[in-house]
Amino acid sequence: MRLRFLFATLCGLVLAGLVHIVTVLAIPALSESDALTRSGTSESLDHPQRIYTLSTGDNPAPAEAWLPIPDPSVAVGVCAYNLDDGPMRVSARTGPQMLSLAVHGRRGAFYAVTDQAAVRGALDLVILTRAQYDEALANDDENEPSRDVRIIAPERQGYVVVRVIAALPSQRPAANDAVQAVSCTIDSPNEDAAKPNG
């Protein structure tokens, strides 16, 4: 009798554990307000959507942000992309404050870079599908190689998180401005073809 009770208890605990694990893993897929969905409102913007703005003087920090904020001295913005519209170009100018870009898909981050990788004060990422990458490679000019950092995305939809650190309270306005200064645009091959030569 005692063995049956222990066996039933053990089976119940294992079943409860499996249900818990399956539920936790299913939350991102079933959630209607996951990070990818919420970032979608920034697809039509040319600059990052503000997620967390640092407090400056009379302007307090926002009460909530939907991305985890690891540090109250980090300004955060997000740019969503859909590669069906074309490759996404993310351009940033470096300054005295540390800037980082992290590219996310539905399954999490798959690429990250800091301003230490900038060339002549500029950081240009181009996020593409494999087919778009092959096309860009075929169209490259041998005499003028591209300086873009090309990233092949595992999925067509995703978002880029921009973070800028304010080491001192006096740098907070500049950190907020640096996030907004990042450019997020769609590279259109039609526009490039329409440009006059020379």
Image (tube, helix red, strand yellow):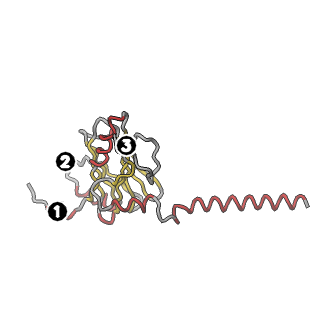
Q: Residues within 10 Å of mark 2 (few under 14, many from 20)?
A: few
| Residue at mark 3 to residue at mark 1: CA–CA distance | 44 Å
Q: Is residue 14 above or below residue 59?
A: below
Q: Which residue is identified by label 2?
A: 144
Which of 30/54 is in front?
54
Please name which of the two marks, 1 or 2, marks the residue nearer to the observer. 1
In the rendered image, the quadrant that contains the N terminus is: bottom right
Q: Residue at x 35, y 45 (%)?
A: 59
Left or right, 184 with reference to 69: left
Residue 55 badge: 3
Please, what secondary structure does the residue beneath circle 2 have?
loop
Please name which of the two marks, 3 or 1, marks the residue nearer to the observer. 3
Which of 11/162 is in front?
162
In the rendered image, the quadrant that contains the C terminus is: bottom left
Please, what secondary structure does the residue beneath circle 3 have?
loop
Can residue 115 be seen here? yes
Can residue 113 be seen here? no
Which comes before the other along the chain, label 2 or label 3? 3
Amino acid marked by disc 2: Glu
Q: Are marks 2 and 3 in contact (CB under 8 Å)?
A: no
Q: Residue at x 46, y 43 (%)?
A: 70
Which comes before the other along the chain, label 3 or label 1? 3
Which of 194/159 is in front?
159
